[in-house]
Image (cartoon, rainbow, N blue to C red):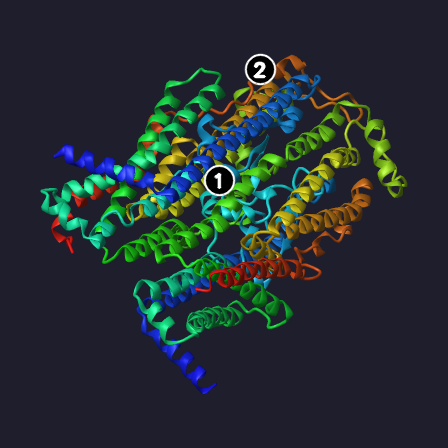
Amino acid sequence: MHMKKNRYHLEFKLFFRNSSSWIGIFILLITGFAGQYFGKTFIARQQAVIEKAATLQKKNTLNNIDHFGNDIGLLFFHNKFTLANVPDHWAAFANGQRDINPYLISVTMLALEGQLYDTDINNPVSLLLGNMDLSFVFIFLFPLVIIAFTYNLLSEQKESGIWSLLKAQTNQSFQIIWQKFLVRVVVIFSVALLLLVIAMLYLALPPDLTFLSVTVLVLLYLTFWFAVSFFIISLGKSSNFNASALIAVWVLLCIVIPASFNLFLTRKYPVPEALQNVINQREGYHEKWDMAKDVTMKPFFKHYPQLKKYPFPEKKTFSWYWYYAMQQMGDDQAMASRLAIDKKLARRQHFTSIFALFFPTIQTQLGVNKIAGSDLDTHLEFQQAVRKYHEQIRLHFYPAIFLNQSVNDTDIKDYKMEKYTRQQIPNVWTNMLSISLLTMVMIGATVFNLKKDSI
Amino acid sequence: MSGRISTIAKQTFKAAFNNGATIALTLLLGLSLCLATYIGWQNFKMQNNQRLHYKALVRAQWLAKPDKHPHRMAHYGYLAFREKHELSFFDFGIESFAGVSIFLEAHKQNTVNFSEAGFTNGMLSFGEISVAMVLQLLVPLLIIFLGYNSISAERESGTLKILLCQDVSWKQLLWGKTIGIIGICLSIFIPLILLTILLWASLSNWQISMDSALRLLLLVLSYAIYFFVISAITVLVSAFARSSKSALITLLACWIFFMVIMPRITQAVGVKIYPAPSKIEFADAIAADVHQQGDSHDPNDPHYAAIKDSLLKVYAVDDVKKLPFNYGGYIMAEGEKITSKIYTKHQDKLNNIFEKQNSITTITGFLNPYLSLKNISMALTSSDFNTYVDFQQQAENYRYQLAQKMNKLQIEKISNIKPGDEDKPLAISKSNWAEQPDFNYHFKKLDTVLSNELLALSALTFWLLVTVISLHYSTKRIKTI
């Protein structure tokens, strides 16, 4: 027992004496810090914009009342209501889709489908090259350092001739490789934990169950890569073969397979429904101008029987009552295509989640995005929240508009920017399970290898 | 001298193909290239057909609108779809991150919506496989695997000394090895290019434009230079490295740093140095400027009051209703002119900020050949930032012309007397709608594209020079043993 402890002590010493070990650790720490810094900057900017949006909401409402206050229909034609998708602390850890999808949606009371999909103003090149955050470091760079630390554990011994000496002297030669390997596992895990603890402080991540599950997910992912590396080592090939093979595996898992999958996904599930939806919404509203008022009002009152009690000015060529009902028709007639988009996206999601079961890289990325609330699902929920908010505003102000009340009799001034936050943080059990199983498979294959040719 | 180089090159080429792993890797790459070409082409066809389908639908709907007030038509507006360049199946560039459709209406500038990225779930952060991606990222990896031991293995086995004793110079050796490795790359690159040309020609129904042909030619040339640069660097590292192993590790580390980490960092730095306004700040700044210039909705606004006074004076009438044209239309045309000018000013400023953000990545091309090639490739396939901005500008021009066309129709054809509350609304004949032409995006010509990409082009040329000079003159510093 004592001797074993001594041997580990020696292996640690040997490991840290090597300058390339320090370079690897240093790279992980530096990129880890950079990832946290850029990830935090990105999210802090969004938070600042949300705060600004809150003040602008107030200012613009007052401005609009000032300008259009004597015509309530015109006021609500112009006035926007804002809902903000407030970033979770974890969003700084994994920026995910928060750069692509708008986190502030401002809508007037007019047809929602024509406004809901408006994007933010973005630099498409930045979107293409991607964000630098801590999850990137864990998912892409840690495996590379794991590969660099382990690829020649056995082959180097063989190539320098030490291995045959060792084998002659002790029957526990394999133990030595195993000890070297464990030393590297301990070092990488320590660096990962250190970065996570720093992230906890710097990104203000609460030390709760979520933190624990991200930690477990990350460590499982790193374990998978150790298992891959150990499998390649167990083949007993040369250092150069190991390095090439491991990099090839990395390129496959981190670039080629996900990138090919993307192309396949676009091909298999295109979303022309989105373009159809724009057209439906536009026609659904605009065509009503050239039709009898009944064509608009009948379905409108069918949709909202409770509004029938407000008298509709049939004879007037134009009334805001008619106008808002026409706008409503835009949304109502786009209903089918909107649901078709949802359905298509759900099918995409489903297919992706099944595919991801077999690829830990994708699994981990999707897992941390999910926890960080920077995934597509969270954005779709946010859109849903905007729909609900929009509907609530419509129903609240329709009567005042239809009765042509004075703006001062409404409570529009009380409407502030609303914040949307998730109801619950999702769990990542499936992600953990799939990575664990794949790791187990790798370990199984390694054991089989080792037994077969007992290096 | 050149005879020796070609002998070494041939030897390198043959030796590589004696190795089973090389053949496997090369075949795999070739296969994935064919797959990327095929699916990329299919995606291109599908997406472009979708856009063309909706483009035709939008046009038909526009023409079918009944008689109505021209200002109703201005609000009905137009939907423009961003078409893909025929070469964009080769390099997707920012295609998936840029919106596809934009709604063009009076008074209001909308965003380009429905990018492919908005429909995916974080997967896109891994990238999308395209011919360009394979050639830019994976071929260099193949070059590294082929060439990391090109010199060092000769040194380790002792054959290097023999070679040099046999009157082979270092220069010949380096050039020969480099050319041999490029030969292997070209053996997959050339068939692929032929395939690309075939596909592309069939895409454009065998009617190839000179502009596109030149684009493709330059594309081929740029990639060939890129492969040369990477091969030369690989051979040089192999020559300078202590061992094959250290050459391999150095090259792999460089590949990861320059192709995976660096692009993200340079762009993040660019965004940090040149912050762009958020959408609400952007809109607020425009609103403030418009307010300052005058508010067409405000009857007491000094700017519009002055216009009114001068019109009354010129036509010697005491009420705008007595003017011989539609006064409302005239004021709207003036308002559109002012707001559109202000908007364009702000949009140009925004694009300028984005360009500055991107310039960090472009300048880094001098440190990183991958980035310079990436920019050139995107520009030549019209899947780059400039093309996107150009689309936005052409769409905005179209929007402005449409709005002003409708204002003109209103000024000329709509009565100046407002109908009563219960009267039939004023309208003009639907035959007027056809006067507004369809929206057609025109890609920039090659010379404009090239002048935009001067920096990236000079970066790649710089790399070519650096590697040629290094192959020629660094030989004195290399150790034989």
Q: Which one is nearer the viewer's eye here, A415 or A350?
A: A350
Mark 1 chain: B
Question: Which dot marks residue B435?
Answer: 2
Residue A231 horizontal side relative to residue B328, left or right: left
The reply to whether residue B454 is in sight is: no
Asked if B442 appears above or below A27 in the picture, the reply is: above
| Quadrant of image for the N terminus of chain B | top left
Q: Residue at x 15, y 53 (%)?
A: B480
First along the sequence among labels 1 and 2:
1
Q: CA distance from mark 1 to mark 2?
A: 43 Å
Q: Amino acid at mark 2?
A: Glu
Asked if A389 appears above or below A178 in the picture, the reply is: above
Q: Position of residue A269 (x, y in %)?
A: 63, 37
Q: Secondary structure at mark 1?
A: loop
Q: Residue furthest front?
A: A168
Q: Residue at x 45, y 82 (%)?
A: A4
Q: Position of residue B394 (x, y in %)?
A: 48, 28
Query: Label 2: few (<14), some or many (≥20) within 10 Å?
Result: few
The reply to whether residue A344 is in sight is: yes
Q: Position of residue A219 (x, y in %)?
A: 54, 66
* Residue behind mark 1: B129
Residue A357 horizontal side relative to residue B401, left or right: right
| Quadrant of image for the C terminus of chain B | bottom left
Asked if B251 appears above or below B437 in the picture, the reply is: below
Q: Amino acid at mark 1?
A: Ile
Mark 2 chain: B
